[in-house]
Amino acid sequence: MTAIAQAEIERTVQAALMAHGAGAFPAAEVARAVAQAEAAGNRICGLYYLESYCQQLVSGRVLGDVVPVVTAPRPGAIHVHAQMGFAQPAFAYGLAPALDAARQFGIASLAVGHAHTCTALGYFTEQIARAGLIGLGMTNASPIVAPPGGKTRMIGTNPIAFSVPDGQGGLAMQFDQSTTTVALGKITMAKAAGERIPEGWALDADGNPTTDPAAALAGSLVSTGGYKGWGFGLMAELLTAGLTGGVLSRDVKPLKAPDGPPHDLGQFYILIDPSTSDAFVDRLTQFTTYLAEDDAGRMPGQTRVLPDPVDVDPAAWKQAQTLAGLDA
Protein backbone atom coordinates (compact mmCIF):
# COMPACT_ATOMS: atom_id res chain seq x y z
CA MET A 1 0.00 0.00 0.00
CA THR A 2 1.03 3.62 -0.55
CA ALA A 3 0.41 6.32 2.10
CA ILE A 4 -1.11 9.45 0.55
CA ALA A 5 -2.50 12.52 2.31
CA GLN A 6 -6.24 13.05 1.91
CA ALA A 7 -5.60 16.54 0.51
CA GLU A 8 -3.30 15.05 -2.14
CA ILE A 9 -5.93 12.50 -3.11
CA GLU A 10 -8.46 15.33 -3.48
CA ARG A 11 -6.10 17.45 -5.59
CA THR A 12 -5.20 14.56 -7.87
CA VAL A 13 -8.79 13.40 -8.37
CA GLN A 14 -9.96 16.96 -9.02
CA ALA A 15 -7.19 17.44 -11.58
CA ALA A 16 -8.10 14.15 -13.29
CA LEU A 17 -11.77 15.08 -13.53
CA MET A 18 -11.03 18.57 -14.81
CA ALA A 19 -8.62 17.14 -17.39
CA HIS A 20 -11.52 15.11 -18.76
CA GLY A 21 -14.07 17.92 -18.90
CA ALA A 22 -15.43 18.58 -15.41
CA GLY A 23 -15.77 22.08 -14.01
CA ALA A 24 -13.82 23.09 -10.93
CA PHE A 25 -16.71 22.97 -8.44
CA PRO A 26 -18.20 19.60 -9.52
CA ALA A 27 -14.71 18.12 -9.68
CA ALA A 28 -13.89 19.37 -6.17
CA GLU A 29 -17.10 17.93 -4.72
CA VAL A 30 -16.54 14.52 -6.33
CA ALA A 31 -12.87 14.54 -5.30
CA ARG A 32 -13.79 15.17 -1.67
CA ALA A 33 -16.14 12.17 -1.73
CA VAL A 34 -13.51 9.94 -3.35
CA ALA A 35 -10.87 10.90 -0.76
CA GLN A 36 -13.24 10.23 2.13
CA ALA A 37 -14.23 6.86 0.68
CA GLU A 38 -10.56 5.89 0.46
CA ALA A 39 -9.96 7.05 4.03
CA ALA A 40 -12.93 5.00 5.22
CA GLY A 41 -11.55 1.90 3.50
CA ASN A 42 -14.46 1.91 1.03
CA ARG A 43 -12.31 1.40 -2.04
CA ILE A 44 -15.27 0.44 -4.21
CA CYS A 45 -16.44 4.07 -3.99
CA GLY A 46 -12.94 5.58 -3.99
CA LEU A 47 -10.20 5.65 -6.62
CA TYR A 48 -11.69 2.47 -8.10
CA TYR A 49 -14.40 4.68 -9.67
CA LEU A 50 -12.15 7.44 -11.03
CA GLU A 51 -11.40 5.89 -14.42
CA SER A 52 -15.13 5.39 -14.99
CA TYR A 53 -15.86 9.01 -14.06
CA CYS A 54 -13.26 10.23 -16.57
CA GLN A 55 -14.42 7.93 -19.36
CA GLN A 56 -18.03 8.99 -18.87
CA LEU A 57 -17.10 12.68 -18.85
CA VAL A 58 -15.47 12.21 -22.24
CA SER A 59 -18.37 10.19 -23.68
CA GLY A 60 -20.98 12.58 -22.27
CA ARG A 61 -22.63 9.96 -20.10
CA VAL A 62 -22.13 12.38 -17.20
CA LEU A 63 -22.03 16.14 -17.72
CA GLY A 64 -19.28 17.78 -15.72
CA ASP A 65 -20.00 21.46 -16.23
CA VAL A 66 -23.73 21.80 -15.53
CA VAL A 67 -25.32 23.90 -12.78
CA PRO A 68 -27.94 22.07 -10.66
CA VAL A 69 -31.35 23.71 -10.38
CA VAL A 70 -32.95 23.96 -6.92
CA THR A 71 -36.70 24.36 -6.42
CA ALA A 72 -39.10 24.09 -3.47
CA PRO A 73 -42.49 22.76 -4.61
CA ARG A 74 -43.57 22.72 -0.95
CA PRO A 75 -42.08 24.59 2.03
CA GLY A 76 -40.56 21.39 3.43
CA ALA A 77 -39.66 19.75 0.13
CA ILE A 78 -36.46 20.70 -1.67
CA HIS A 79 -35.87 19.37 -5.16
CA VAL A 80 -32.60 19.48 -7.09
CA HIS A 81 -32.38 18.76 -10.81
CA ALA A 82 -28.81 17.55 -11.31
CA GLN A 83 -28.95 18.18 -15.08
CA MET A 84 -27.45 14.73 -15.73
CA GLY A 85 -24.35 15.77 -13.80
CA PHE A 86 -22.63 14.40 -10.72
CA ALA A 87 -24.68 13.75 -7.58
CA GLN A 88 -22.16 15.35 -5.21
CA PRO A 89 -22.45 18.95 -6.45
CA ALA A 90 -26.22 18.57 -6.81
CA PHE A 91 -26.47 17.54 -3.16
CA ALA A 92 -24.24 20.46 -2.18
CA TYR A 93 -26.63 22.87 -3.89
CA GLY A 94 -29.64 21.44 -2.09
CA LEU A 95 -28.21 20.84 1.38
CA ALA A 96 -28.40 24.38 2.81
CA PRO A 97 -32.05 25.02 1.85
CA ALA A 98 -33.00 21.52 3.05
CA LEU A 99 -31.32 22.14 6.42
CA ASP A 100 -33.12 25.47 6.72
CA ALA A 101 -36.46 23.84 5.92
CA ALA A 102 -35.95 21.03 8.45
CA ARG A 103 -35.01 23.48 11.19
CA GLN A 104 -38.09 25.56 10.45
CA PHE A 105 -40.62 22.75 10.11
CA GLY A 106 -38.97 19.96 12.10
CA ILE A 107 -38.65 17.70 9.07
CA ALA A 108 -37.89 18.17 5.40
CA SER A 109 -37.07 16.14 2.31
CA LEU A 110 -34.32 16.63 -0.23
CA ALA A 111 -34.90 14.97 -3.60
CA VAL A 112 -31.97 14.92 -6.03
CA GLY A 113 -33.05 13.78 -9.48
CA HIS A 114 -31.48 13.21 -12.90
CA ALA A 115 -28.08 12.54 -11.36
CA HIS A 116 -25.08 10.30 -11.79
CA THR A 117 -24.51 7.55 -9.23
CA CYS A 118 -23.76 8.96 -5.78
CA THR A 119 -21.54 5.97 -4.83
CA ALA A 120 -21.16 6.13 -0.99
CA LEU A 121 -24.57 7.20 0.28
CA GLY A 122 -23.43 7.67 3.88
CA TYR A 123 -21.14 10.44 2.69
CA PHE A 124 -24.27 12.56 2.25
CA THR A 125 -26.23 11.60 5.35
CA GLU A 126 -23.09 12.22 7.40
CA GLN A 127 -23.11 15.85 6.24
CA ILE A 128 -26.70 16.16 7.45
CA ALA A 129 -25.78 14.73 10.86
CA ARG A 130 -22.71 16.93 11.26
CA ALA A 131 -25.04 19.88 10.74
CA GLY A 132 -27.04 18.67 13.77
CA LEU A 133 -29.93 16.87 12.08
CA ILE A 134 -30.85 13.21 11.63
CA GLY A 135 -30.29 12.10 8.05
CA LEU A 136 -31.94 9.19 6.24
CA GLY A 137 -30.99 8.63 2.60
CA MET A 138 -31.50 6.12 -0.17
CA THR A 139 -30.84 5.66 -3.87
CA ASN A 140 -31.47 3.18 -6.66
CA ALA A 141 -29.04 1.71 -9.16
CA SER A 142 -28.73 -0.51 -12.23
CA PRO A 143 -30.88 -3.69 -12.04
CA ILE A 144 -29.16 -6.65 -10.41
CA VAL A 145 -31.74 -7.96 -7.91
CA ALA A 146 -34.57 -10.37 -8.70
CA PRO A 147 -37.55 -10.83 -6.37
CA PRO A 148 -37.13 -13.70 -3.92
CA GLY A 149 -37.75 -16.93 -5.82
CA GLY A 150 -37.52 -15.14 -9.18
CA LYS A 151 -34.94 -14.73 -11.95
CA THR A 152 -35.72 -11.37 -13.54
CA ARG A 153 -33.57 -8.49 -12.33
CA MET A 154 -35.95 -5.74 -11.24
CA ILE A 155 -34.16 -3.34 -8.88
CA GLY A 156 -30.64 -2.29 -7.91
CA THR A 157 -28.74 -2.87 -4.70
CA ASN A 158 -30.66 0.25 -3.56
CA PRO A 159 -28.66 1.23 -0.47
CA ILE A 160 -30.00 3.02 2.59
CA ALA A 161 -27.91 5.20 4.92
CA PHE A 162 -28.81 6.61 8.35
CA SER A 163 -26.77 9.14 10.34
CA VAL A 164 -27.47 10.54 13.82
CA PRO A 165 -25.74 13.63 15.29
CA ASP A 166 -24.01 13.53 18.65
CA GLY A 167 -24.85 17.17 19.38
CA GLN A 168 -21.20 18.21 19.17
CA GLY A 169 -20.67 18.26 15.42
CA GLY A 170 -19.93 14.54 15.24
CA LEU A 171 -21.78 11.27 14.76
CA ALA A 172 -23.62 9.28 17.40
CA MET A 173 -24.12 6.52 14.85
CA GLN A 174 -24.14 5.86 11.13
CA PHE A 175 -24.80 2.92 8.88
CA ASP A 176 -24.64 2.73 5.11
CA GLN A 177 -25.62 -0.54 3.53
CA SER A 178 -27.10 -2.02 0.41
CA THR A 179 -30.42 -3.82 0.64
CA THR A 180 -28.64 -6.87 -0.81
CA THR A 181 -26.39 -9.25 1.08
CA VAL A 182 -23.38 -7.58 -0.52
CA ALA A 183 -22.70 -4.53 -2.70
CA LEU A 184 -22.33 -5.10 -6.44
CA GLY A 185 -18.79 -3.72 -6.37
CA LYS A 186 -17.69 -6.65 -4.20
CA ILE A 187 -18.73 -8.98 -7.02
CA THR A 188 -16.99 -7.00 -9.77
CA MET A 189 -13.80 -6.70 -7.71
CA ALA A 190 -13.82 -10.46 -7.04
CA LYS A 191 -14.18 -11.12 -10.76
CA ALA A 192 -11.30 -8.76 -11.58
CA ALA A 193 -9.12 -10.49 -8.98
CA GLY A 194 -10.04 -13.97 -10.20
CA GLU A 195 -11.54 -14.88 -6.83
CA ARG A 196 -14.63 -16.87 -5.86
CA ILE A 197 -17.41 -15.31 -3.84
CA PRO A 198 -19.10 -16.81 -0.75
CA GLU A 199 -22.25 -18.82 -1.29
CA GLY A 200 -25.32 -16.80 -0.35
CA TRP A 201 -24.26 -13.61 -2.10
CA ALA A 202 -25.72 -14.28 -5.53
CA LEU A 203 -27.64 -16.52 -7.90
CA ASP A 204 -26.82 -17.48 -11.49
CA ALA A 205 -29.13 -16.78 -14.43
CA ASP A 206 -31.13 -19.93 -13.65
CA GLY A 207 -31.74 -18.84 -10.06
CA ASN A 208 -29.24 -21.25 -8.49
CA PRO A 209 -26.72 -20.24 -5.80
CA THR A 210 -23.28 -19.55 -7.24
CA THR A 211 -19.77 -18.77 -6.04
CA ASP A 212 -18.63 -17.67 -9.52
CA PRO A 213 -18.62 -13.85 -9.77
CA ALA A 214 -19.09 -13.98 -13.55
CA ALA A 215 -22.18 -16.14 -13.13
CA ALA A 216 -23.40 -13.78 -10.41
CA LEU A 217 -23.05 -10.78 -12.71
CA ALA A 218 -25.07 -12.65 -15.32
CA GLY A 219 -27.63 -13.58 -12.69
CA SER A 220 -28.77 -11.59 -9.64
CA LEU A 221 -27.76 -10.62 -6.13
CA VAL A 222 -29.62 -11.85 -3.06
CA SER A 223 -31.68 -9.42 -0.97
CA THR A 224 -30.63 -9.19 2.68
CA GLY A 225 -32.96 -11.42 4.67
CA GLY A 226 -34.94 -12.44 1.60
CA TYR A 227 -38.33 -10.72 1.50
CA LYS A 228 -37.28 -8.28 4.24
CA GLY A 229 -34.40 -6.84 2.26
CA TRP A 230 -36.49 -6.97 -0.91
CA GLY A 231 -39.11 -4.82 0.80
CA PHE A 232 -36.55 -2.18 1.80
CA GLY A 233 -35.16 -2.26 -1.74
CA LEU A 234 -38.64 -1.62 -3.13
CA MET A 235 -39.13 1.27 -0.70
CA ALA A 236 -35.89 2.84 -1.89
CA GLU A 237 -36.87 2.22 -5.51
CA LEU A 238 -40.23 3.96 -5.28
CA LEU A 239 -39.00 6.93 -3.25
CA THR A 240 -35.85 7.58 -5.25
CA ALA A 241 -37.44 7.21 -8.67
CA GLY A 242 -40.94 8.42 -7.88
CA LEU A 243 -40.10 11.49 -5.79
CA THR A 244 -37.09 12.68 -7.79
CA GLY A 245 -38.17 12.09 -11.38
CA GLY A 246 -35.27 9.69 -11.97
CA VAL A 247 -35.71 6.43 -13.82
CA LEU A 248 -36.51 3.01 -12.41
CA SER A 249 -33.56 0.69 -11.85
CA ARG A 250 -34.66 -1.49 -14.77
CA ASP A 251 -33.91 1.40 -17.14
CA VAL A 252 -30.40 2.11 -15.81
CA LYS A 253 -27.56 0.70 -17.86
CA PRO A 254 -24.45 -0.69 -16.07
CA LEU A 255 -23.10 2.15 -13.95
CA LYS A 256 -19.45 1.82 -14.97
CA ALA A 257 -20.00 1.40 -18.72
CA PRO A 258 -17.91 4.11 -20.41
CA ASP A 259 -20.68 5.26 -22.73
CA GLY A 260 -24.44 5.02 -23.14
CA PRO A 261 -27.32 7.03 -21.72
CA PRO A 262 -26.87 9.07 -18.51
CA HIS A 263 -27.55 7.24 -15.27
CA ASP A 264 -30.54 9.54 -14.56
CA LEU A 265 -30.71 8.25 -10.99
CA GLY A 266 -32.43 9.72 -7.95
CA GLN A 267 -31.32 10.13 -4.35
CA PHE A 268 -33.90 10.86 -1.66
CA TYR A 269 -33.14 12.20 1.81
CA ILE A 270 -35.23 12.90 4.89
CA LEU A 271 -33.85 15.46 7.34
CA ILE A 272 -35.22 15.46 10.90
CA ASP A 273 -34.50 18.04 13.60
CA PRO A 274 -34.05 16.03 16.84
CA SER A 275 -34.85 19.13 18.92
CA THR A 276 -38.55 18.67 18.05
CA SER A 277 -38.53 16.17 20.94
CA ASP A 278 -37.24 16.98 24.41
CA ALA A 279 -36.58 13.27 24.89
CA PHE A 280 -34.30 12.52 21.94
CA VAL A 281 -30.93 13.40 23.47
CA ASP A 282 -31.82 11.68 26.74
CA ARG A 283 -32.93 8.47 25.00
CA LEU A 284 -29.85 8.46 22.81
CA THR A 285 -27.62 8.85 25.85
CA GLN A 286 -29.50 6.17 27.76
CA PHE A 287 -29.26 3.68 24.92
CA THR A 288 -25.59 4.35 24.24
CA THR A 289 -24.81 3.78 27.93
CA TYR A 290 -26.94 0.65 28.01
CA LEU A 291 -25.32 -0.71 24.85
CA ALA A 292 -21.84 -0.21 26.29
CA GLU A 293 -22.64 -2.69 29.07
CA ASP A 294 -22.12 -5.46 26.52
CA ASP A 295 -18.52 -5.97 25.44
CA ALA A 296 -19.64 -6.35 21.84
CA GLY A 297 -22.07 -3.44 21.96
CA ARG A 298 -21.29 -0.35 19.95
CA MET A 299 -23.13 2.26 17.92
CA PRO A 300 -22.09 1.79 14.28
CA GLY A 301 -19.85 4.59 13.07
CA GLN A 302 -19.63 6.30 16.45
CA THR A 303 -15.91 5.80 17.00
CA ARG A 304 -14.80 6.01 13.39
CA VAL A 305 -11.70 8.13 12.86
CA LEU A 306 -10.53 8.55 9.28
CA PRO A 307 -6.78 8.18 8.83
CA ASP A 308 -4.64 10.84 7.21
CA PRO A 309 -2.49 9.92 5.37
CA VAL A 310 -4.45 7.10 3.77
CA ASP A 311 -3.15 3.71 2.62
CA VAL A 312 -4.21 3.43 -1.01
CA ASP A 313 -3.71 0.74 -3.61
CA PRO A 314 -0.50 1.60 -5.52
CA ALA A 315 -2.01 0.63 -8.88
CA ALA A 316 -5.10 2.76 -8.26
CA TRP A 317 -2.94 5.71 -7.22
CA LYS A 318 -0.72 5.34 -10.29
CA GLN A 319 -3.81 5.30 -12.48
CA ALA A 320 -5.16 8.43 -10.77
CA GLN A 321 -1.89 10.27 -11.41
CA THR A 322 -1.97 9.18 -15.04
CA LEU A 323 -5.54 10.38 -15.46
CA ALA A 324 -4.53 13.70 -13.90
CA GLY A 325 -1.52 13.99 -16.23
CA LEU A 326 0.88 13.88 -13.30
CA ASP A 327 2.83 10.73 -14.14
CA ALA A 328 5.49 12.32 -16.30
Image (tube, rainbow, N blue to C red):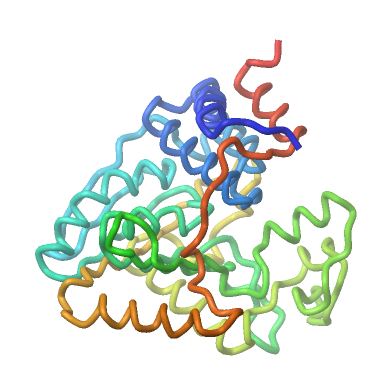
Nearest the viewer among 214 and 181 is 181
Q: Residue at x 67, y 69 (%)?
A: 182
In the picture, measured across the screen, residue 93 lies left or right of residue 232, that is left
Q: Which residue is at the front of the view, 308 or 240?
A: 308
Residue that sits furthest to the top in the current view: 328
**What residue is drawn where x is 47% and y is 58%?**
121
Residue drawn 32% across the image and 44% down it: 92
Q: Is residue 182 above or below residue 200?
A: above
Q: Quadrant of residue 152?
A: bottom right
Residue sitting at x 41%, y 37%: 29
Provide residue 314's location: percent of width, then percent of height.
75, 33
Picture coordinates of residue 44, whole percent (x, y): 65, 51
User: Camera-side residue: 16 or 167?
Assistant: 167
Screen quadrant of the N terminus: top right
- How many numbered discs? 0
Say which quadrant the C terminus sits in: top right
- Asked whether the viewer can see residue 241, the reply is no
In the image, residue 224 above or below residue 121: below
Residue 24: in sight, yes or no?
A: yes
Left or right? Give the position of 213 relative to 249. Answer: right
Residue 30, horizontal then vertical, whole percent: 47, 38
Residue 273: image location, x then y, percent? 21, 68
